[in-house]
Amino acid sequence: MIKIRSTKVIGLLLVMVMLLSLVAGCGGGDSKTTTVEEIKIGNIIPLSGSAAPLGKIGQEARDMAVEEINAAGGIKSMGGAQIKMLYADSKGDPATGVSEAERLITLEEVALLTGTYQSGVAMPSTEVAERYGIPFVVPVPSEDAITERGFKNVFRLAEKTSWRNRDQVTFIKEMAEKFNTPVKTVALIYENTAWGQGAVRAWEKYIPEAGLEIVLKEPYPSNSSDLTPVVLKAKNLNPDIIMMVSYVSDAALLTNTFAEHKVMPKAYIGTSGGFADPAYFELTGDNCEYYFDIATWEPDVNRPFSADVNKAFKEKYGYSMNAEAVKAYTAMYVIADALERAGSTDPEALRKALSETNITEGPSQMYASEVVFDETGQMVNAPLVISQMRKVDGKMERVSVWPEEEARPGMEIVWPYPGVGK
Amino acid sequence: MDAVKTKKISLIVLFLVIGFIIPQFVTKPYYLHVITMCLLWAYLASSWNLFCGFAGQLSLGHGVFTAVGAYVAVMLFNDYNISPWIGMFAGAGAAVLLSILIGYPTFKLRGAYYALATVAIGSGVVVLIENTQALGPFRVGGAEGLIVKLMGNAPAFFQFMSKQPYYYIALVMLIIVVLFAFWLKNSRLGYYLSALKEDPEAAEALGINVRNAKLVAAAYSAFFTAIGGVYYAMLIRYLEPNAIAGPMMSNEMVFLAVVGGSGTVLGPVVGGITLHAISEVIQFYFGDLAQGLHLFIYGLIVVFMIMFKPQGIIEILQKYYNRFLGITDRGEDEKSVKRTAGS
C-alpha cells in the first residue's frame, strides 16, 4: 500500500514540475509586450545567503528612490514613464549571477542592469551585460578590476578598493603635519581573504610612496577566537600607526585586546566593514574611543540632502541607512538622470547618456557633489570620509572628521591617540 | 527479444534526436543557458558517480577536482596562451595526480571517516587557493578570483558569443560520460567496485586489490570532474575559489547523484537534469518574493524525494522503462540474479 502511495506522490510532484516549466515557458513569451510607459530595470542582489541582510537594505533603498522618482512624474522625456524594478537573487554565487543576468536581459528585456553586492558576482555578470551591450550600473562592489577590463557598458559608482587605502594614507600625512607629530612606521593587520589581500596590495603601494615604512604585515583568519599573539607582535614593534581590515567580531576582538595590553600608537585606523558595523559599539564599549574609520558615507556627514534622505529612510524602514544603501539609492537617481537625457531605452543611447553623466545637484549630493564617469566607467571622484569614534552625550558615535569641509561642525579631531578613557 | 532491442534502440535514438534539436526550438539564450547548466550538473553528478556511486564512497570534496581542472586550464591559457581545449587535459591530468595523492592515504578510511577527510581536504584547498596570489609565473588571483582572458568569439580558445556551442559541448560531454559509466559498470573494474561496495573484506578475501580498484576508479572520476570544471570556467569566465572548489560545488554533485540514484548509470543524469530544472523554475517564480523562499521550497522538494524514493528518481523511471519494454519487474529481478550468479 505504502509503495503505491509514494509512487503517486512522486508522480504528482513530477507532473507539477512539468506544468510549472510549461507555465515558465509561456511567461517568457508574454514579457515582449513592454509598454512605453514602463521602464524595466533589472537588479541582481543577494537576497539569500550570508549577505542577504545587505541585499535587503539595498533593495529598500532602491525602492525608496524609485518611489520618489515615479511620484515626481517618472521620466519626463519619455512621457512620464514609470520605472519598474525587477529583483533577482544572486545567492552571492557567480554562476547564479550570470544566469540571472541572462534571464533579465533576454527574457525580461530590461533596459539596464544594476546591483550585485559582491565583487565576485559583479565580475561575471557585468561581462554578460557587456556581451549583449546592455548598460550595467554597479553601485557597491569595489574590486579594482571591475572597471579595468576595457568594458564599455559598466559604470561604477563606488570607489575602488585601493582608493580607501590611498585616502587613509593621505589622512595620516595631513594629521601628522597638522598636529606636528612625525609619523614613520605603520603596522598592517588584516583578515586573510579577498578583502584584506586587496587592501594590503594597495597599502604596499601608497604607504612607501608617502615616505612611511611598513614594519608589520600580519594576516589572520577571520572569526579568530584569540588575537593576543597578533596584538603582542604589534606592541613589541611599537608602530606609529596601526591599520586594520576586519569583520565585526575580529574588529571588536582586536580593539579590546589592544586596550587590555595598553598599546599606544599615534592612531588606530579601520577600513570600514567590521568597524562600521552597529554591533561594533556593543562589543567594544569604551575601548574603541578615538579609533578612526573610513567610509563613503556617514549619517552625520555634512552634505546636502544627507540628513533628509536618511530621516525619510528611517521613518519608512525603522533604521538608518548605511554606505551601501546610500550608493544604491544614489544609483537610481543616476540611472533616472541618464534615462531622462537618453529619452529612450535603446541600450546604445542609454550607454552614451550614462557616459556623459555630470550631476551636480539633486539627491545624489548626499553621496557626491559631482557624479562623473571616466572613460573606463569608473566614478571619478568617489568621495570618502573618515570618522572618529567619539563619546557624544555619553554615547559612542561615529563622528565625521575628515575632509574638513564635510566634518561635523563643532567637533575637533583627537590626535594622537590618548589611550582608553582619556 | 528482438522487439525489446528495437524498442531500446528507438528510445536511445529518440533522446539523442531531442538532445540535438533542442537549440532549434529554444531560441531564447536564457532558456538555452538553463538547459546547458542542467546538462553540466548532470555531467558533474555522473563524474562523481563514477567512483563514489559505483564504489559506495561518500566524497564530499569533489570540488577540489573541478577547481584543479579549471585553474590549471585557465592559468595555462591566461599566462601562456595555451588553448583551453588542450589545457583541459593538463587540468584533468593534474586532477588525476591529485586524486592519487589524496586517495593513497585516505582510502584506508571507512565510512564517515573517509567522508570527513574529503570535507577537510575540500575546505583546505579553498583556503590554499584564497591565499595564493601567484604560483611561479602563473597568476592565481587569491581570494579575489581569476578572470578568464576574454577573446570574443574564438572557437579555438573555447569561447563563443552564442549559447549554442556551449550547449552542444555540454551535451557531447554528457554523452561521453554516460557511455563511459556504462562501460565501467560492465567492466571487470565495475564488478570489483560493486563487490567492494557491498563488503570490502569479502572483496579483499576474493583476491580483489581493493585499494588499487578504488585508486583507478577515483582517477577516472577526477579526470571527468576536472573537465567539467574547465567547462564551468569557460562558460562563466570567472573563477572564484569558494564557488568552484567550495562546499556548494562539492555537495551539489553528491546531492544530484543521490537524489537521481547513485550507483546507476543514468541516475545522476536524471537527478542533475530534474533537480536543476526544478531549482531554476522555483528561482524564476519565487526568487524575488520573500528572501530565500525559493531555496526553502527547493529543500522541501528534495526532502520529499529522499523520503519517498530513497533509491533515487531513477527507480520510478526504471519501472516505466521496463513496462515500456514489456519486461515485468520479476523478470528483471531474475535476470539480475542470473547475472550475479554468472559473474
Image (cartoon, helix red, strand yellow):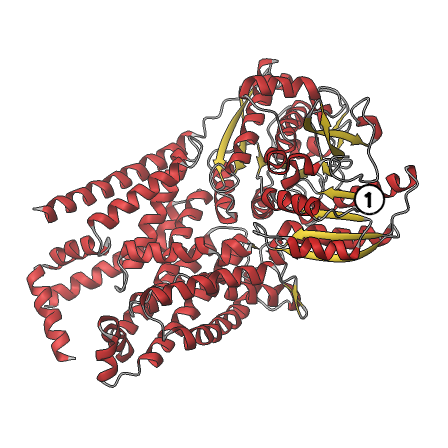
- Amino acid type assigned to the residue bearing label 1 in the image: Lys
Give the x, y percent position of residue B280: 39, 43
For residue B57, side relative to residue B194 (left or right): right
For residue A373, side relative to residue A34 (left or right): right
Give the x, y percent position of residue B125: 52, 63
Which quadrant of the figure has residue A33?
top left
Give the x, y percent position of residue B120: 46, 63
Q: In this view, does A352 lie above or below B152?
A: above
What SS does tag 1 mark? loop
Q: In this view, does A183 lie above or below B336?
A: above
Residue lying at 38% horizontally and 77% vertically, measured from the top left: B215
Give the x, y percent position of residue A395: 67, 26
Q: Can you identify the residue that label 1 sits on?
A: A266
Q: Nearer the viewer, residue A300 or A249?
A: A249
For residue B183, side relative to residue A403 (left or right): left
Q: Which of A158 and A375 is in front in this view?
A: A158
Q: Which of A150 and B15 is in front in this view?
A: A150
Q: Which of A409 and B155 is in front in this view?
A: A409
* Figure quadrant of the C terminus of chain A: top right
